[in-house]
Image: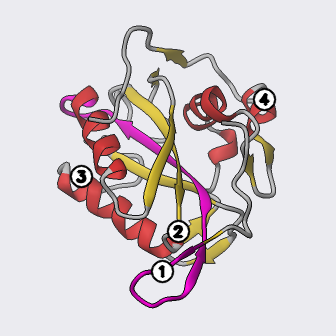
Amino acid sequence: MNETPNPHIIDADTLTGGFRPIRRVVVALGSNLGDRVANLQGALNAVADTPDVEVVGVSPVYESAAVGGPEGSPDFLNAVVVVDSTLHARTLLERALAIEDAFGRVRTEPGAPRTLDVDLVVVGDKVIQEDDFVLPHPRAHERAFVVLPWASVDADGVIPGQGRVGDLAGQVDTTTITRVDGLELRIE
């Protein structure tokens, strides 16, 4: 899975007859409230059920300490899903937010515990700086709970402006993250 799709490969948009590139998209999943495993599995299934999205890799599950949240926040379960998609970045963001909402995500203070976090990390090589949408995801390159799972399924993946994920995985603090052996997410 270390091949990045050719950005010049196109797929016909059956609604408009236009063409859209197939882009490699990386989605980070996290949960630290409720049935964390069921939340991650449900999110994976929802991503896989999204039209014009093809799952090409699912990372192992990792457990990590909460970062930037209130004192005593429960640990997260995290995974990364690598997909190929012809959807626009904004459409993918709207789908991610809808999946969070379906799992009871309540938005309070930043870093607060949550049933589900579905973050777009990269959408091809797109760079977006808008008030409500930033790509690549800020600080993803610093987060072990993103780069370790991602590197386990696509070490040659790249975070635009930051570098190769396999290299970044060797630079993050891994003292508060562990791989959860025996726990595997599968498309159902």
Q: x%, y% of residue 27? A: 49, 49
Q: Nearer the viewer, residue 187 or 64?
A: 187
- Identify the magenta region: 11-36
Q: For mark 1, what is the residue?
A: 13
Q: Which residue is mark 2?
A: 86
Q: Amino acid at mark 4?
A: Gln
Give the number of the mark in front: 2 or 1.
Answer: 1
Q: Is residue 107 visible?
A: no
Q: Quick one: label 2 or label 1, which is nearer the N terminus?
A: 1
Q: Mark 3 or mark 2, which is nearer the start of the sequence? A: 2
- Check contact, mark 2 vs mark 1: CB within 8 A: yes
Q: Secondary structure at mark 4?
A: loop
Asked whether the beta carbons under mark 3 and mark 4 sit within 8 Å of each other, the answer is no
Mark 3 or mark 1: name the one nearer the start of the chain. Answer: 1
Q: How far is disc 1 from disc 4 in space, using C-alphas?
A: 40 Å
- Seen at 51% across and 29% down, the residue is 59
Where does the image place residue 170, in percent across and percent down from the top left? 78, 25
Which mark identifies residue 171?
A: 4
Cα separation, mark 2 vs mark 3, equals: 27 Å
